[in-house]
Amino acid sequence: MDVLSDAIAAMRTGRPHSSRTARFAPWGFRFSPSRGAGFHVVLQGTAWLLPPDDGAPVRLGPGDVVLLAHGTGHALADRPDTPLVDAQPAPDGSWPTPSDRGPVGAEETLLLCGAYQLSRARAHPLLTELPPYVHFPARVGTHPRLRAAVDLLGAELAEPQPGSDAVVPALLDTLLLYLLRAWWLTECGDRSTGWSAALSDPVVAGALRALHDDPARAWTVEELGALGGLSRAAFARRFTALVGRSPLAYLTWWRMTTAGRLLRSDDLPLRAVAERSGYSSEFAFAKAFKREYGVPPGQYRKGA
């Protein structure tokens, strides 16, 4: 798997949800902090995002998308000074559509909102590097695949068809990847360090793909450097500077993250989890896992 897809898979804990709803001025909703991630899309009309930490309000126009990757509390309103009420999600976490049409002549805003259930316990650094919110203004020719995913999701929610229960979660997963890719493509040209730079560096990105493709392999720094035509020392310096961990330290972290995901979501025997995580001995795996998580793998599985 590629690194971006793996980063999402390692954190996902449940089904995403979304809703398409109309709001009629005046309206203003306060969203409480959550452990997941969320997004808002303005399909029609305008809205104002009131960011976390009392940041300056951000005007959103038709086609604008906002990603809140860390689940921080925020608000959405028709105007920055509109009084806010707490958003009341449905049992599945979606935002219900109001039954009233609002006052006669009230300005209508059509919104597409959604949220993802993610675990922060082993958050991949690719995602922790994201700012509190990312705004993608609607501009002709920018991020066409992201726009296409938004259009498909909006149409599916507006007119559900047979199979929509399977299509909508798949589109939401696709949308999240497109949002993260759009951020990465926007940021990678402006940064010389960090994960956006790491994924745009052919040598480091190639090594990361190799580690994610086969984390159980007994990789050496020399082998990883040779993939990009660098010496051991030159590769180690380059990798550490961009990723923030040495190659083998990152490999160990990713192996333990993979093991935690398998224990949380699969019924594989511990021996099989150990082998997939790069350990030939179940005892050595259990010792390394307890050092990383604070509990033995069997206890971790029961708790999960």
Image (tube, helix red, strand yellow):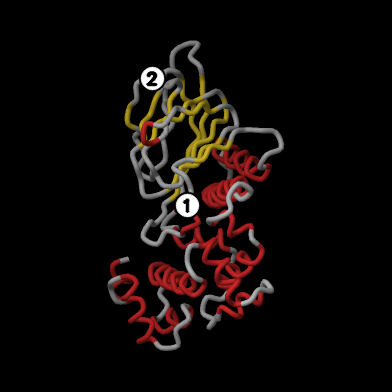
Residue at x 62% of width, y 38% of height: 151
- Tell me how far mark 1 sits from mark 2, CA to CA: 32 Å
In this rendering, is residue 124 above or below 285?
Answer: above
What secondary structure is marked by label 2?
loop
State which tag comes first along the sequence, 1 or 2.
2
Which amino acid does the dot numbered 1 rest on?
Glu
What secondary structure is marked by label 1?
loop
Asked whether 132 or 105 is in front, the reply is 132
Q: Residue 56, how many percent across, how many down?
A: 44, 28
Q: Residues within 10 Å of mark 1 (few under 14, many from 20)?
A: few
**Which corner quadrant of the image does residue 281 belong to?**
bottom left
Asked whether 152 or 242 is in front, the reply is 242
- Does residue 163 show up? no
Residue under label 2, please give it: 82
Which amino acid does the dot numbered 2 rest on?
Thr
Residue under label 1, please give it: 129
Q: Residue 256, how many percent across, how many down?
A: 42, 72
Q: How crowded is mark 2: few (under 14 residues within 10 Å), some or many (20 or more)?
A: some
Q: Residue 125, how many percent across, how many down?
A: 46, 58
**Which corner quadrant of the image does residue 186 belong to?**
top right
Left or right relative to 210: residue 258? left
Tag in front: 1 or 2? 1
| Quadrant position of the C terminus in the picture | bottom left
In this rendering, is residue 190 above or below 78?
Answer: below
